Image (cartoon, rainbow, N blue to C red):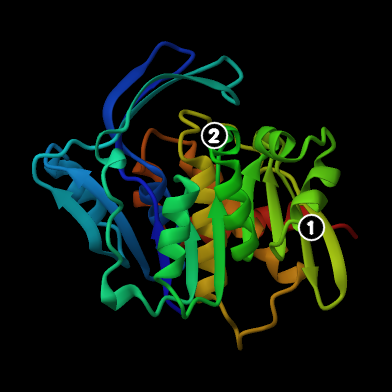
Amino acid sequence: MSLIVTGTIGIDTVETPAGEVREGVLGGSCAYFAAAAQHHGAVNIVAAVGEDFPEEHMAKLSGLKGVDRRGLEVRAGSKTFRWGGKYHNNMDHRDTTFTDLNVLIEAPPVIPDEYKDAQYVFLANAHPMVQLGMLEQLPGRRLAVADTMDLWIDTARAELDQLITKVDGLVLNYDEAQLLTGHNNTVAAAKHILDMGPSFVVVKKGEHGCLFVIRDQDGVGIGALPAFPAETVVDPTGAGDSFAGGMMGYLAHDQNGEPEFNLARLKAALAHGTVMASFTIETFSLDRLASLTTNELGERFDEFARMLRVH
């Protein structure tokens, strides 16, 4: 099944609690998502960068197996989105040191005609009107999932509410779920969002894993998964996007006879996303996702599955 992701590709500057600074590394929601999803199968990316986008970063994207770049626009006269972040000692929180929107304040990229039959769609974090515009160009979609952030909850609530009614799933973190619904309890917040329109909601809780609710033929189901207990945490940037990439990559490509979408299938997809995110945090940028082998991925997933099994 075809999978498409729309979002950002940028240039990041990251500072860790140890004082190590990496400047000018490849980042962006679209890049992390694609680097994760490609381990399950082909993924098409739709994004825009400026003429300042480094050749080494383009080469890294080109080296990702299964990633189709025909939807990546390189715009003459424009500058690439840039972001900087400094992580706190617990590595679960960070301060944004700068954000240069650059190409993101221009018209959004155009979805190539070759992509418009995509059945699995992930709308990575962007203004809700941009996400709605992308969604309207993909009439053959089977499953559409969106990410969002506190900025849009505060400044574009009406548009975000409209988007939520049109997607099948919403992925957001705990703070965003609380802000969106007014509920401090994660279960109550997730169920509130479910009542707003989507079929399922995933609330990310960082090192504490995720909680999810789904409405299927059996009614409303609820579940939770822990994070993989990582020993090495170098850079958490992109963990949420690679989590989504692992989830959507699994749903789009590991059909096994196309079983119905239900609580069990969502849980399996989120387990794959959790494992993928555990690799992302081991290095800066996309380095670990780019070098990850099928055997390494399989071994860690099996380890995670054993951890979850109760006899």
Other-residue count near label 1 (Cα within 10 Å), few / some / many at <14 / 14–19 / ≥20: few
Which amino acid type is marked by label 2? Thr
Residue at x-position 64% and y-position 61%:
165
Residue at x-position 31% and y-position 33%:
101
Disc on the earlier residue, 1 or 2: 2
Q: Foreground: 194 or 243?
A: 194
Q: Residue furthest right?
A: 311
Q: Name the secondary structure under disc 1.
A: loop
Q: Foreground: 96 or 61?
A: 96
* Label disc, if present, on residue 195 of the rendered structure: 1
Q: Residue furthest bottom?
A: 257
Query: Relative to residue 110, is residue 237 depicted above or below?
Result: above
The residue where tag 2 is placed is 155
What is the x, y in percent for residue 162?
Answer: 60, 56
Q: Residue furthest top?
A: 19
Quarter of the image for the C terminus: give it.
bottom right
What is the x, y in percent for residue 134?
Answer: 41, 62
Q: Name the secondary structure under disc 2.
A: helix
